[in-house]
Image (cartoon, rainbow, N blue to C red):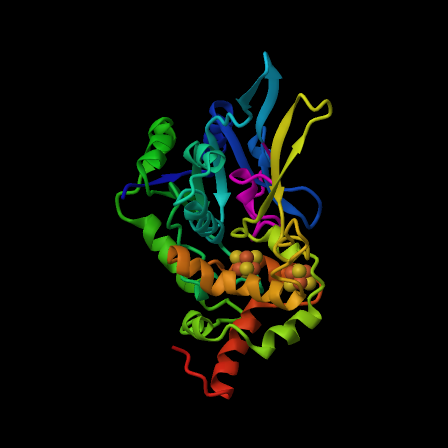
């Protein structure tokens, strides 16, 4: 793996060059407390000092509302025209948990059922990860197989250093992004970058406010679908869906057509939420998840069991957003701890 060092001045030059040559989507602070990813027009708009964005960057691969295709009739024929024509985009400054979130989304849209819209964006997107330098009180990525300096899945991994940034090349696409502007980078001949990243990783490991033990949870849930615990949790949940919209791995969507004249129009999709009562309601009125109990159970089984069943990946990356934003303080870390306790109390085997 090649590694380079770039000075702060050269980083600015590099980013401005990337903005000129690509669409660069980076973390921006919009209001005092809201940070999100959006296309930027200059280095000065970017906030590289953010901890974790309020809204996850998944929307750049799976937009909140996305036009899929246009349709129109002519000569008694129905014609379709693609709506999605993405150019190359660089998602710059992603935190490691959000890279892991994209890796968790990949098999959903790129597995047995191929989703051309996600694939087109994904193939045209380069992921530049930025190691964390602080841990928020809701973060628990280290309990979910990740870590604040683990850039697995990215094309390039940046680490802040005293005299600039270290850049580790993880893929050939990442290498191209460095080679194209090679005059801005110095080769890291004595492994300073990986040493700095390791030290940062060790320092941050002690800053997590809570570590949870997910061992055996999936196997416990395999055996115990009906638990009174889900009723207790459902009594607190408001069914607002905030947790699903800000989650980097949630991916429910709805599809709808708009056609003012009945002859032409557009088919679109938009994020939906399994926490909404109508999400699973069928045309005849039957709803297989009629109460909040079934819905909240589904959400947490999805995070802790179903995603693993289907893709051998956790459905939660420990970003902590849902913990931070849930209006009634439902905390997935506490749910994991409670499930461990339920298993112990009932003397039910964890595996
Ligand atoms: S379930 Fe919560 S903590 Fe886990 S990835 Fe989603 S938003 Fe982050
Ligand atoms: S954010 Fe909290 S209250 Fe709202 S649906 Fe999610 S768990 Fe329920």
Taking the image as drawn, is residue 36 in sight?
Answer: yes
Q: Residue at x 36, y 32 (%)?
A: 178
Drawn side of residue 176 relative to residue 36, left or right: left
- In the image, residue 185 lies at what x, y percent? 36, 34
Q: Residue at x 45, y 64 (%)?
A: 305
**In which quadrant will I find the N terminus?**
top left
Q: Residue at x 33, y 54 (%)?
A: 195
By secondary structure, the bulk of the magenta-drawn segment is best described as loop
Q: Nearer the viewer, residue 19 or 218?
A: 218
- In the image, residue 108 lies at what x, y percent? 45, 47
Q: Nearer the viewer, residue 292 or 204?
A: 292
Ligand 2 location (quadrant):
bottom right
* Quadrant in the rendering for residue 30: top right
* Quadrant in the rendering for residue 322: bottom right
- In the image, residue 249 lies at what x, y percent? 51, 52
- In the image, residue 320 lies at what x, y percent? 56, 60
Q: Residue 47 magenta-drawn?
A: yes
Q: Nearer the viewer, residue 265 or 318?
A: 265
**In which quadrant will I find the C terminus?**
bottom left
Counting the numbered discs, the total is: 0
Taking the image as drawn, is residue 28 in sight?
Answer: no
Placement of 95 over or under 124, stated as above or below: below
Q: Residue 133 magenta-drawn?
A: no
Q: Read off the magenta span.
A: 46-67
Placement of 38 over or under 252, stated as above or below: above
Q: Nearer the viewer, residue 298 or 123?
A: 298
Placement of 59 over or under 318, stated as above or below: above
Q: Residue at x 61, y 66 (%)?
A: 294
């Amino acid at each position: 793996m090649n590694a380079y060092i770039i000075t702060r001045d050269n980083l600015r030059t590099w980013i401005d060059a990337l903005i000129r040559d690509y669409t660069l989507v980076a973390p921006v602070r919009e209001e005092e407390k809201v940070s999100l990813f959006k296309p930027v027009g200059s280095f000065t708009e970017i906030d590289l000092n953010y901890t974790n964005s309020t809204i996850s960057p998944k929307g750049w691969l799976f937009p909140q509302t996305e036009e899929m295709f246009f349709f129109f009739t002519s000569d008694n024929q129905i014609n379709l025209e693609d709506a999605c024509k993405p150019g190359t985009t660089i998602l710059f400054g992603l935190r490691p948990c959000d890279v892991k979130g994209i890796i968790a989304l990949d098999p959903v849209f790129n597995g047995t059922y191929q989703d051309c819209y996600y694939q087109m964006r994904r193939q045209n997107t380069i992921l530049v990860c930025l190691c964390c330098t602080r841990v928020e009180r809701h973060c628990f990525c280290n309990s979910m197989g990740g870590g604040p300096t683990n850039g697995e899945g990215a094309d390039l991994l940046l680490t802040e250093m005293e005299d600039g940034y270290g850049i580790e090349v993880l893929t050939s696409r990442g290498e191209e992004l460095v080679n194209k502007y090679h005059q801005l980078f110095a080769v890291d001949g004595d492994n300073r970058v990986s040493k700095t990243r390791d030290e940062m990783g060790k320092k941050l490991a002690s800053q997590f406010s809570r570590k949870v033990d997910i061992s055996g949870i999936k196997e416990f849930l395999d055996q115990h679908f009906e638990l009174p615990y889900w009723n207790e949790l459902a009594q607190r949940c408001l069914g607002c869906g905030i947790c699903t919209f800000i989650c980097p791995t949630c991916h429910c969507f709805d599809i709808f057509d708009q056609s003012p004249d009945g002859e032409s129009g557009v088919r679109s999709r938009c994020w939906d939420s399994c926490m909404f009562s109508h999400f699973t309601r069928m045309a005849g009125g039957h709803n297989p998840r009629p109460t909040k109990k079934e819905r909240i159970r589904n959400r947490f089984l999805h995070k802790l069991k179903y995603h693993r069943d289907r893709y051998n990946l956790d459905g939660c990356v420990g970003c902590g957003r849902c913990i931070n934003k849930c209006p009634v303080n439902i905390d997935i870390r506490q749910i994991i701890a409670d499930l461990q306790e339920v298993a112990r109390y009932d003397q039910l085997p964890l595996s």
